[in-house]
Image: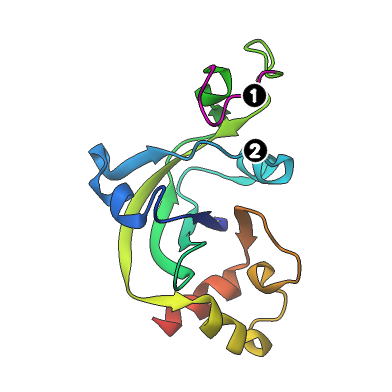
Amino acid sequence: MNYWLMKSEPDCFSIDDLKSRPKKTEAWDGVRNYQARNFMRDGMKIGDGVFFYHSNCEIPGIVGLATIASTAYPDPTQFIEGHEHHDPTARRDEPRWLLVDVKYQRKLKRTISLAELKAREADMPGFQLLMKGNRLSIIPVRKEHWEYVLALE
């Protein structure tokens, strides 16, 4: 089993939005970074754990848990002219962008803020979220970091 952290701006798509979806599942569309795409394509498996992270908000942090509910498949928004995620260079016979379905598990009892995680950085060496310059919307999480963060709850 692998673990991931997936970032979303709560004004665009929040943990509550995921909870309210039919079957509590949603396609994680709009990823337009090759490394993040490759994580979905090559690393994510059905059942993998996900930290749902709210970014670009008053208190950024981990707010909930989800699981990967599908293998990677082409993101249809890349082909929709006028859509904010449209990619005019993507081809249907060779899609450039992929997505996975994510299934809600639960909200955390409290937000584990980025500030709190940074304050505990010495206890989690190598936690990719805390590395300088890390701007990816999807990052792998080591098992020991997964367990440590859950224990903070």
Disc on res. 114 = none
Disc on res. 32 = 2
The magenta stretch is 81-88
Question: Of label 2 and label 1, which has the lower sequence position?
Answer: 2
Q: CA distance from mark 2 to mark 1?
A: 9 Å
Which one is in front, 15 or 57?
57
Crowding at mark 2 (Cα within 10 Å: few <14, some 14-19, many 20+): some
Could you tell me if the residues under marks 2 and 1 are in contact, i.e. CB atoms within 8 Å? yes
Given the current orientation, which residue lies at the most extreme right position?
Answer: 133
Residue 149 drawn at (x, y percent): 50, 77
- Image height check: is 73 above or below 147? above
**Can you say which quadrant of the picture contains the N terminus?**
bottom right
Q: Main secondary structure of the magenta part?
A: loop
151 vs 140, left or right, is left
Q: Which residue is mark 1?
A: 87
Secondary structure, mark 2, is loop
13 vs 44, left or right, is left
Q: Amino acid at mark 2?
A: Arg
Residue 96 drawn at (x, y percent): 68, 25
In terms of image quadrants, where is residue 135? bottom right
